[in-house]
Image (spheres, helix red, strand yellow):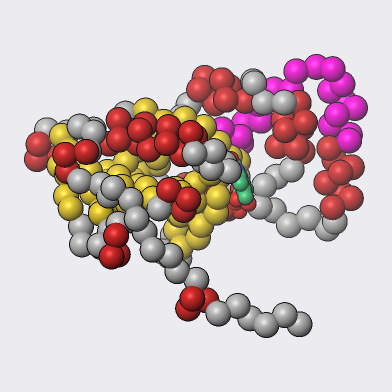
């Protein structure tokens, strides 16, 4: 057996320009735009992979990765099965947190907010361009349920493929998009001497739907 790696030595020195108030875009979505463009330009593997944390009715936390399908001032959109574990959690507790872990840039973005379904038309638009293989897999598997074997899934998929051969697969009613409507978006940038920068946009209802920016201690 290989020796357990010494995790205490797995650290790095962060040396970047940091993130100062003067550098920050006026809105969280413009700031996210800039950093997302940087993540793409840096050729990070799957820059749109994001950790989504949810909690069940008892408050027990849970988290998993999904792929971000879009974002704008209204929020961050991902697609999944409404019948999955996360779907059940969001049905009773429609709040989530997101983390974009952009290690290579010494950055993370954290989001908290309420969650809503995007609606049928928007879900159709997200379903239609998916390759048939991905549509078949989504339609044949009821996400997060237990299955007896992999073969059972393969067989279901094969049967669905044969039954619908060549035809366009309609979007299953349980598949669709969620939007995380942020009430806070934090931009974290690793800095020299570990004095990292944390700037957070927070929705401020007192300000009539406006946002305030806070600096947080690292
Ligand atoms: C890189 C990556 C991308 C993923 N993208 C999605 C996605 O967009 N939608 C999705 O439902 N699951 C996605 N998954 C699978 C989820 O992590 C998870 O296994 C699944 O959604 C079931 O989660 P749940 O049981 O908590 O509902 C992805 C996993 C990885 C590793």
**Vertical arrangement, residue 72 with respect to residue 204, above or below:** above
User: Which quadrant would residue 60 be assigned to in this image?
Assistant: bottom left
Query: Which of the pair 213/159 is nearer the observer?
Result: 213
* Residue ID at (61%, 34%): 175
Residue 166 lies in magenta, yes or no?
yes
Spot the residue most to the top: 167
In the shown orientation, is residue 119 left or right of residue 127? left
Expressed as whole percent of the image width and height from the top left, the position of residue 165 reads 87, 21
Q: Position of residue 103 (x, y in %)?
A: 46, 53
Q: Which residue occupies 80% across, 17% down? A: 167
Q: Nearer the viewer, residue 152 or 49?
A: 49
Q: Is residue 47 magenta?
A: no
Tell me the magenta residue range.
158-176
The residue located at (89%, 42%) in the rendering is: 155
Which one is in front, 117 or 213? Answer: 213
Residue shown at 83% from the left, 46% from the top: 153
Q: Position of residue 96 (x, y in %)?
A: 40, 50
Outermost residue, left direction?
A: 206
Which quadrant is home to the N terminus? bottom right
> Is residue 178 in view from this perspective?
no
Q: x, y percentage for residue 202? A: 21, 45
Q: Is residue 182 left or right of residue 171?
A: left
Looking at the picture, does residue 107 appear above or below residue 38?
below
């Amino acid at each position: 057996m290989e020796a357990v790696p010494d995790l205490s030595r797995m650290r790095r020195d962060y040396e970047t320009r940091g993130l100062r108030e003067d550098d920050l875009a006026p809105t969280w979505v413009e700031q996210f735009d800039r950093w997302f463009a940087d993540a793409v330009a840096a050729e990070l593997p799957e820059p749109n992979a994001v950790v989504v944390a949810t909690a069940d009715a008892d408050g027990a936390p849970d988290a998993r990765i999904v792929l971000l399908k879009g974002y704008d001032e209204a929020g961050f959109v991902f697609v999944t099965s409404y019948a999955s574990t996360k779907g059940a959690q969001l049905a009773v507790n429609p709040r989530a947190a997101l983390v974009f872990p952009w290690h290579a840039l010494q950055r993370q973005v954290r989001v908290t907010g309420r969650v809503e379904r995007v609606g049928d038309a928007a879900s159709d638009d997200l379903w239609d361009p998916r390759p048939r293989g991905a549509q078949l897999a989504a339609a044949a598997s009821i996400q997060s349920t237990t299955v007896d074997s992999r073969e059972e899934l393969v067989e279901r998929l094969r049967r669905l493929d044969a039954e619908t051969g060549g035809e366009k697969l309609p979007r299953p009613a349980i598949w669709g998009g969620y939007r995380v409507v942020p009430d806070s978006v934090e931009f974290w940038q690793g800095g020299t001497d570990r004095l990292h920068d944390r700037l957070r946009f927070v929705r401020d209802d007192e300000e009539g739907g406006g946002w305030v920016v806070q600096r947080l201690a690292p």
